[in-house]
Amino acid sequence: MLSNETLKFGEKLASVTLGIDKLFRVEISSNNSMDGLVVINMGKSKTYEIESYDEARSILSDMVKEALKLPEVDRRLYYSQTCISLDSFCAYRQNKLNSLTSQVGMFLHVNPAPASQLEIDGYCKELRTLLTQMGYTGDLKSQAVKWEEKNLVPKENVKEVMDDLMKVAREKTGTILELPENDYYKCETESGSAFGARSDYDRRCVVINIDPILTKPSLKHLVCHETYPGHFMQFTLRRVLYERGLAAADGLLSVVNHSSSSTFEGIADTSMEFIDWVENDDDRVCEILRNMKSAIGTTSSYFMHALNWEDKKIEDWLRKVALVGGEGAIQSRMRFIKDTSRSALIWSYWRGHQGVYDVWNRVSKDDRKRYFDYIYGRLHTVQSMQLFK
């Protein structure tokens, strides 16, 4: 149960966030390709009328002081970081926070260092060991391509496979979380996207980009990440618990470059473990490749926005280090990091999974229900999640 003070604070924060979103949308009204700050609004909070970013920053400065007086320790930490995150977004719009690494640190509250070659090499070593044990031969690239070919799902079969996997994932998720009745997800496919997949909550649809080469284990991961028990369940439980008076109103908003972004992605990326669906070596290979993809994403964004590498140089680097996915995956990644609203956000996947998995890995089986209540019932930063005990 959250205190009345915290519930009231969450309502005020939702209104202020919508006010900042309104300011931003006026600025970008001529650019149809850009999202607002708030990308999903499941609530009915009134928009706080804010005239300028300076006014917004003054309001947030006062709210930090309010946040630090809240009864719950984890809410004091989370909400103070959230106010700093929103203030940093305002500073960014005022051209006062131009460094990519500063944006990563201040928007997301995670380590802004990109993945190093040493860390990427560590994933490669782990992957090579596993693929060799599975009987794949040749150098690592050859092994990975052979594994990909063995597990390939043709583009025309993606929707059918996704729909079948969603049925299994939903059933498994029902053993750990309360499922919504008569509320289901469907699958659609698209090309030319910056995303591997995206969850369209309003339409109850997971949209898969079929440009990259896709495997059944990777689709299994995307099902968990985007639907059960990932983003669909995150959104659904936030709404249900708010309606029951158990969750705060700010949880009804999905906000880009936000203090909660990393744990939002980290929960989704760890969700296969939540439902005990890592069944075999193919799943384990996919998990290593997913970690590599997230790590490489930070490095490629850093090359583009911090070191000012040309596109061709980054693409050549990606072709060298990315073991699977083909040219479609490379072009999708380039579209993602070119979007200035996503260039810092890409850190949320790698750092978010690290933060969530570290806590999950120490939770006993007997304590998992309380853990799920903690991570699905309220928003978190990587730091506030560590307070679970």
Image (cartoon, helix red, strand yellow):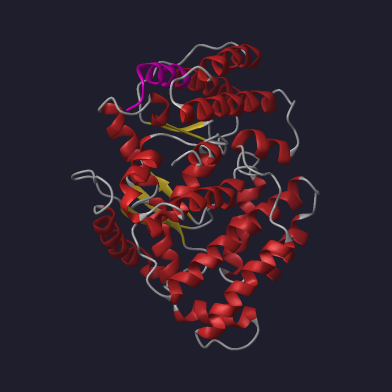
Q: Quadrant of the N terminus?
A: top left
How many numbered markers are drawn?
0
Residue 301 placement (x, y as % from top left): 69, 50
Q: Going by the image, does 252 lie left or right of 147?
A: left
Asked whether 372 falls inside the magenta stretch, the response is no
Magenta stretch: dominant secondary structure? helix
Q: Is residue 289 visible?
A: yes
Query: What residue is drawn where x is 18% and y is 45%?
Result: 182
Query: Does residue 123 appear left or right of residue 152 in this picture?
Result: right
Out of 335 and 80, give the one closest to the viewer: 80
Magenta run includes residue 12 = yes
Above or below, 371 relative to 195: above
| Quarter of the image where one finds residue 86 | top right
On screen, 153 above or below 44?
Answer: below
Reply above or below: 112 against 151.
Answer: above
Residue 386 picture location, percent across and down:
51, 42
Q: Nearer the viewer, residue 306 or 333?
A: 306
Residue lying at 48% horizontally and 22% vertically, measured from the top left: 18
Residue 11 falls left or right of residue 170? right
Q: Does 255 appear above or below 312?
A: above
Residue extent of the magenta highlight:
1-13
When asked about the image quadrant of residue 143, the answer is bottom right
Q: Residue shown at 62%/34% (left/top)?
A: 107
Residue at left 60%, top 78%?
A: 128
* x then y, percent, for residue 247: 34, 28
Q: Quadrant of the C terminus?
A: top left
Residue 29 in sight in this render: no
Residue 376, percent from left and from top: 37, 40
